């Protein structure tokens, strides 16, 4: 999926996306990109965290369309606090991709996982993609997640995304716009999290 026509799900305001070779083989060879050093392909996590993690904090259930999936590999540390934060990052990714696929910049779920300027940027970004006539389809793979808890209410998370099997889709025709797999198909994200009063 090309960056300029369909940016990835969390690249705005409080989230900086940097392309680094650490997230891919960098040789542009699809076969080589299928196996990335340090990633256990068998440890695929669920795209949506379990209901027990949602409790009563107002986290909405988001179901991606059948032609789109977010795969999270190795997003478990065994530490309850870290895993709770990572679960909300996963929900944030799902919600943003759902908003893009559905063309809904006012999706309430965005307000659960973004606030302030980041929320405004998220809405503007979804709107710009819809105005350009695109949706998304395929598989986004998220892996190599690393988390650092700063204190009880904030954390930093770095993770990679493999977009080699995710593509833009024309909203009117449904045509999938496939692009070649290159080093730009692998993106590194660095984001800061702040826990709100509801515990999200």
Image (cartoon, rainbow, N blue to C red):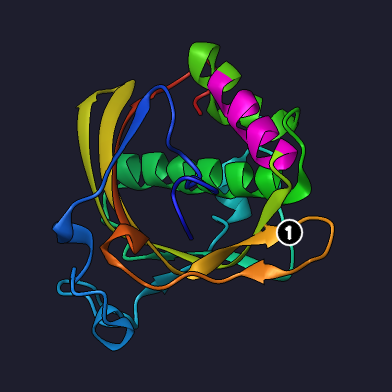
Q: Magenta span: helix, strand or loop, mainly?
A: helix
Residue plotted at (51% across, 29% down): 200
> Is residue 61 depicted above or below 47 in this figure?
above
> Is residue 39 depicted above or below 159 in this figure?
below
Residue 56 in view in this figure: no
Q: Is residue 150 left or right of residue 8?
A: left
Please name the residue that numbered disc 1 is placed on: 170
Q: Secondary structure at mark 1?
A: strand
Q: How many marks?
A: 1
Q: Residue furthest right?
A: 172
Q: Residue furthest bottom?
A: 31
Residue 18 at what x, y percent from top left?
25, 42
Q: Is residue 89 left or right of residue 184?
A: right
Closest to the observer: 136 or 55? 136
Residue plotted at (27% across, 29% down): 155
Residue 193 at what x, y percent from top left?
36, 27
The magenta segment: 121-131
Residue plotted at (49% across, 20% down): 118
Residue 10 in view in this figure: yes
> Is residue 24 depicted above or below 55 in this figure?
below
Residue plotted at (69% across, 51% down): 134
């Amino acid at each position: 999926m090309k960056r300029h026509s369909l940016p990835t799900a969390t690249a705005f305001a409080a989230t900086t996306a940097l392309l680094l070779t650490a997230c891919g083989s960098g040789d542009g060879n699809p076969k080589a990109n299928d196996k990335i050093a340090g990633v256990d392909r068998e440890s695929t996590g669920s795209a949506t965290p379990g209901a027990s993690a949602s409790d009563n904090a107002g986290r909405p259930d988001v179901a991606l369309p059948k032609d789109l999936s977010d795969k999270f590999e190795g997003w478990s540390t065994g530490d309850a606090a870290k895993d709770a934060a990572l679960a909300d990052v996963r929900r944030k990714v799902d919600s943003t991709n759902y908003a893009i696929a559905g063309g809904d910049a006012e999706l309430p779920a965005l307000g659960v996982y973004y606030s302030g300027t980041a929320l405004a940027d998220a809405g503007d970004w979804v709107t710009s993609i819809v105005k350009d006539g695109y949706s998304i389809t395929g598989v986004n793979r998220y892996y190599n997640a690393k988390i650092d808890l700063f204190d009880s209410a904030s954390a930093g998370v770095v993770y990679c995304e493999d977009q080699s099997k995710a593509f833009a889709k024309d909203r009117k025709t449904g045509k999938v716009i496939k692009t070649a797999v290159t080093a730009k198909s692998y993106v590194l994200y660095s984001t800061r999290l702040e826990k709100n009063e509801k515990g999200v």
